[in-house]
Image: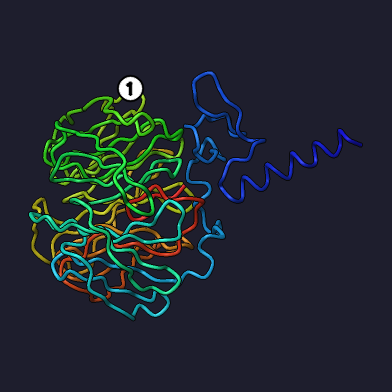
Amino acid sequence: MKGQLHWRLLLVALLIGAVSGIPSAAQTVAAPTGRVSTPATVAVAPGMPPVIDAANLYSEAASGHMSAAVTGALARVYVPNVKSNDVYVIDPSTFKVVDRFKVGVNPQHVVPSWDLRTLWVANNAEGRTDGALTPIDPKTGKPGTAKLVNDPYNMYFTPDGGSAIVVAEALKRLDFRHPQTMVLQFSLPTPNCAGINHADFAIDGSYAIFTCEFQGGLVKIDPVNRKVLGYLKLSKGGMPQDIRVSPDGKLFYVADMLADGIFVVNGETFTETGFIPTGVGTHGLYPSRDGKKLYITNRGSNKMHGPPHGKGSISVLDFASGKIEATWPIPGGGSPDMGNVSADGKLLWVSGRYDNVVYAIDTTTGAVKTVGVGTEPHGLTVWPQPGRYSLGHTGNMR
């Protein structure tokens, strides 16, 4: 009886850990490498929730996998407008703007916190010294008191949730901060990464790769030991933007706005292995909810400040084959930029950067609906999203 009871308790512990995303004592077994073994046979960084499916690191961000932490959150799309210094709030059920509020200077991205309880507006105050992070309560949709932070162009979180990583683009550094108070913990200089901005993490959390927009390359960092592991110069193009890891964690796809396509990089060896043409001004990367496809936004211009009604489009990559299976032009031209996929996976919401609109794109047909917003919308987020925790940006969910 005691043996049977032990195994029943062990099973309960495993189930609780899988649902909550927090490793239980039954799930965490110290490995000689200093990482932690999980039921999915992936050894992860200390404190990181387990990998449930080693073949698909996006498995827990699939439709219907909603965390208890987002209970009560309003279904909204939050749109930061860089030039009008405000956030527009869209009700996705009606495609109507239902609220707007002022934030800091140059709001760039709306970032879900690691614990899914706060949305942070990153106001980098480009060329100024009054950068700030404005919290939004997802249950009310209202902003709180901003926290002064140097140059927060973007923000990510360490896989264990212990630190926010503020991407101080103009300062060429990453600032590790307390994930709630934003008190500085540690600064990591990245001197050979001009324009450091977007990132994604290895399947085991042992490293992250950031893009260097103004240096035509990438930087690989160790978020656990907080050190730079190396730099990689890309072979052509020269303006890398967003980056996303493949479902099996082996490859990283890097959007390049000058190369008009995505570079393929082996994360472990940190080497470039291929290039896939997509469209003009390749910019944002968003996996489908089932982890089978990658939606790629092509902004329609190779310039940082492009014209409206450009040759904007969405390319759809099949992860399994590594090939583009569809391209959806924006009717009448446009500038699709940053965003994310709806919780049910049926719509891709992205900002129209130079057209002052938001696009809601049907992920089956490519049909587009538009919603007018403020001036120069950028890194919008859809909320709530499925997932156990957020690694940052507009919802890099795991």
Count numbered badges in the picture: 1
Residue 297 vs 354, above or below: the answer is above
The quarter of the picture where residue 111 lies is bottom left
Instruction: Please name the residue shown 27% across and 73% down the image.
Output: 88
Task: Looking at this view, name the residue that lies furthest to the right.
Answer: 1
For label 1, count other residues whose C-alpha is less than 10 Å away and answer few (under 14), some (14-19) or many (20+): few
Q: Position of residue 119 (x, y in %)?
A: 37, 61
Residue 382 vs 172, above or below: the answer is below
The quarter of the picture where residue 394 lies is bottom left
Task: Looking at this view, name the residue that lies furthest to the top.
Answer: 32
The answer to whether residue 116 is left or right of residue 369 is right
The answer to whether residue 116 is left or right of residue 337 is right
The colouring scheme, among rainbow, by chain, secondary structure or one colour, is: rainbow
Tell me the SS state at disc 1: loop
The answer to whether residue 24 is left or right of residue 270 is right
* Residue toward you, 192 or 128: 128
Q: Position of residue 312 (x, y in %)?
A: 19, 59
Instruction: Please name the residue shown 39% across and 41% down the image.
Output: 158
Instruction: Please name the residue shown 17% across and 69% down the image.
Output: 85
Instruction: Please name the residue shown 28% across and 25% down the image.
Output: 229
Q: Position of residue 95 (x, y in %)?
A: 35, 77
Q: Quadrant of the N terminus?
A: top right
The answer to whether residue 271 is left or right of residue 302 is right
Residue of label 1: 269
* Amino acid carrying mark 1 in the image: Thr
Q: Position of residue 393 (x, y in %)?
A: 32, 52
